[in-house]
Image: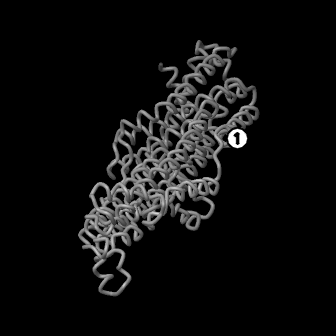
Amino acid sequence: MSAIFSVAGDEWRLWLRSKVAMFALGVMALIITATSVLTAVQMAEARHERLHQQAVAEETFLAQPDRHPHRMVHYGHYVFRAPPPLAIIDPGVDSVTGQSIFLEGHRQNTAMFADTRASANVGSFEGLVPAAAYQLLVPLVLIALGHGVFVREREAGTLAPLLAQGLSGRSLFAGKFAALAGLSAALLVPLAALAAIAAIMGESLALGLAVTAGYGLYLLVWCALIALVSAAAPTRGLALGVLVLAWLAWALVVPRMAVATASSAVPAEGKLETDLRMSADLRALGDGHNTADPAFAELRANLLAQYGVEQVEDLPVNFRGVVAQTSEAELTRVMNEYAGQRMALETAQSAAMAKFGWLSPVLAASSASRILAGTDLTTHHRFLREAETVRYDFVRGLNEAHISKLSYADDINRNQSEAASLRARVSSENWAVLDAFEFAPSPAAARWSAATAPLTMLVVWLAGLVAAGVFAASRLKP
């Protein structure tokens, strides 16, 4: 064990004496610090702004004066998805999926206001968040500093004496790997600080440590690859070339292949085609604003029979409200079917992409990062479902007020005069059907469970590369 630490210590002292190594580490530290501070500030501002806007939206809705209940159905309401605390490390899908939805009757609107301000603030570096820095840039620093850990010994003529003195190739590999692992641990300090900040903001400390450990596992995969290639390559140039090619394949080529393959394996029609099909299905359900629509003839007959009257004017409930309520239920059923199909396709495409983590640890690490941070596609889908629950509940509540608190006669005559319009309004107390909305990420246990698959991929990558590296090092000759 002392020999392993001695080898690792020699590598650390060499890096500390190297101006190039110190410059590279300084630049990397500056990049990580800058991206961490910038992302933390942006996410904190976004969280504060969205929670504030949510409170304002609810206050504004509840403060509306007495109105016709169906006007409030169309007045609508906004819900916002505040970024979770660990978004300061990995904002995930937040920037591309949108973070607010306008809720109204008869429609399921898509999320909007995807965050494009970053591109205006920092030019082309809007995607450079801590997660991207650790996934893409830190491995390059490790490659630059570590590609010669074995080759240098060979070129300097010190490899043979080390082996001749009884130091085994396996111990030498362990020492070089430990040196690279120590360098990775030092580079993880800013990430651990961000995890601590997230814990102060209310996130589970265990999840923050899990994100940090996940990236530590990812960097160990690179350390193992670097030590393996350096042990097997005869020259520094070849080692550096192979490692750069590996970075290009893992970071750029395989992810692009994953996107193309997922789109091909799980094809999805365009939004326009889907909207046209859904519109046709919704029209077949009848117009909820028109009580004379043939689609509601059976509903009319059943109500008249139930209450033993001959015309809707004699019903003890407002038939227009009953039609609105029935129509909304049917519209929601169909819209939820289409929404479920769309989410299922997106989930299948995401699952197809996730399998490419077996070909690229970059994809495995990014998937685990988003899941643990609570910024993945599954979380966005849950936001859409919870927003739809709020939408349907408040529309249903307003329709109930339409049915029971507004007479049919006042309703159909509301445009006769100003006085008639006033009689066709209900008390603003009915707006209290709106439930407060506060979206929260999934519980820690659920995120841990979901991240098991990509973390397992990283463990397999690490075990395989370490085994290959030990084998290559054991074949070194004095």
* Residue 448 in picture, x, y percent from top left: 41, 35
Q: Residue at x 63, y 61 (%)?
A: 124
Badge count? 1
Question: Which residue does the numbered mark 1 point to in the structure image?
Answer: 253
Residue 148's quadrant in the figure? top right
Q: Secondary structure at mark 1?
A: helix
**In the figure, is residue 358 to the left or right of 130?**
right
Picture layout, residue 202 above or below residue 411: above
Q: Residue at x 49, y 42 (%)?
A: 369
Colouring = one colour
* Residue 363 in picture, x, y percent from top left: 59, 38
Tell which of 86 and 427 is nearer to you.
427
Picture layout, residue 77 above or below residue 15: below
Tell which of 48 and 438 is nearer to you.
438
Residue 445's quadrant in the figure? top left
Picture layout, residue 375 above or below residue 320: above
* Residue 329 in picture, x, y percent from top left: 40, 54
Type of the residue with mark 1: Val
Tell which of 179 and 355 is nearer to you.
355
> Residue 177, can we see it?
yes
Q: Residue at x 53, y 42 (%)?
A: 344
Picture layout, residue 52 above or below residue 302: below
* Residue 379 in picture, x, y percent from top left: 45, 46
User: Which quadrant is the C terminus positioned in?
Assistant: top right
**In the figure, is residue 110 to the left or right of 233?**
left
Label 1 CA crowd tier, 10 Å (few <14, some 14–19, many 20+): few
